[in-house]
Amino acid sequence: MKHHINGAELFVEEKGQGAPIILLHGFPLDHSMWQSQVVALSGNYRVITPDLRGMGQSDVPVSNISIAQYADDILTLMDKMGIEKAALGGFSMGGYVAFALLRKAPKRFTGLILANTRPEADGQEARKNRLNMAVSLYEKGSVVARDAMLPKLITEPSKQEHPKLVDTLSMVMESMPAEGLVHACLAMAFREDSVDLLSSISVPTLVIAGEQDPIAPPDVMKKMADQIADASYHVIPAASHLTPMEKPEAFNTLLIDFLKSIKA
Ligand code: MLT
């Protein structure tokens, strides 16, 4: 359903009852990337999967937006939904938003899941690449993001094994509003560095890496986990970047065990 949040309509899927868990998608994706997690969790939890502003079915920002403002949308959404505290999961770009949420409102989160994400801000080269991507997206549309990202999201063997997954991903990425993706590129290019935040994170944290992830490689994620006091670190074998969709069983086992442990 849609919620009116900070002057925009935000699409939010909500399933199940129990302790709330909010899962934030990556770029250039939407809430649908969490489909198998929603199925696995919604028998026991209230699972909330929003589309960040400008992606999926949420309104495209009318002026430029920062990662901190995506986070403000989530805090306002929590207020509107009457959620004082929730477990929070972020995949990749969703992880950047999760860091911003932990910076703004650490007391509102009971546990943190960081999947295939990294705490450093973009360096000069990465920033330049994002700006180039923003221009291409603006000129040629969302297929630019699809073509850039698809080869990195899942491994070759998984592509052979699950052709339907590739079709679904292509469709989702093609259907993104290109201007929303332009905003996301600019927000990521100029996001705050979160390395200093890590030592202040006091909630239990689950860090999940993909063995062959070229975007958030395991060594970067291990270093990140080492700086968070109460973090457990796991690598999913034979997986690339998009672990929640490429290896849903392995991902969900880690997620369910973690959520049980923070409840206990
Ligand atoms: C994502 O999956 O959200 C993006 O790869 C993040 C990024 O490009 O930094």
Image (tube, grey):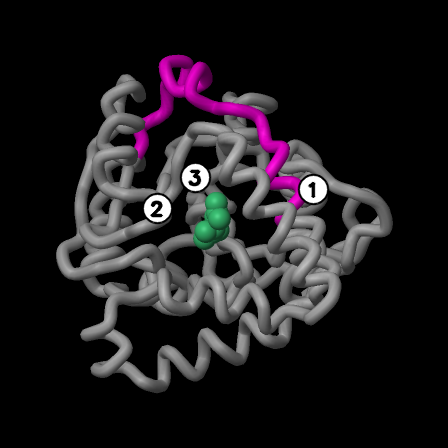
Q: Up-down: is 258 above or below 61? A: above
Q: Where is residue 62 drawn, in percent x and y?
A: 85, 51
User: Vertically, is 114 above or below 183?
Assistant: above
- What whole-number distance in Å separates the C-alpha atoms at marks 1 and 2? 22 Å
Q: Which residues are magenta?
A: 185-205
Q: Kindly tell me whether mark 1's CB lies below 8 Å from ligand 1.
A: no
**First in sequence: mark 1 vs mark 3:** 1
Label 2 or label 3, whichever comes before in sequence order: 3
Q: Which mark is residue 116?
A: 2
Mark 1 and mark 3: span between their CA atoms? 16 Å
* Disc 3 residue crowd, few under 14, some 14–19, many 20+, Cα 10 Å: many
Q: Is residue 185 above or below residue 137?
A: above
Name the residue carrying label 1. Answer: 73
Q: Secondary structure at mark 2?
A: loop
Kind of residue indicated by mark 2: Asn
Identify the amino acid type marked 3. Answer: Ala
In the image, is residue 38 part of the stretch drawn in magenta?
no
Instruction: Give the residue furthest to the left.
Output: 237
Q: Earlier in the sequence, mark 1 or mark 2?
A: 1
Q: Position of residue 79 (x, y in %)?
A: 68, 38
Q: Marks 1 and 2: which is nearer the front?
A: 2
Determine the residue positioned at 52% across, 69% down. 146
The residue singled out by tag 3 in the image is 87
**Does the beta carbon at disc 2 come under 8 Å from ligand 1?**
yes
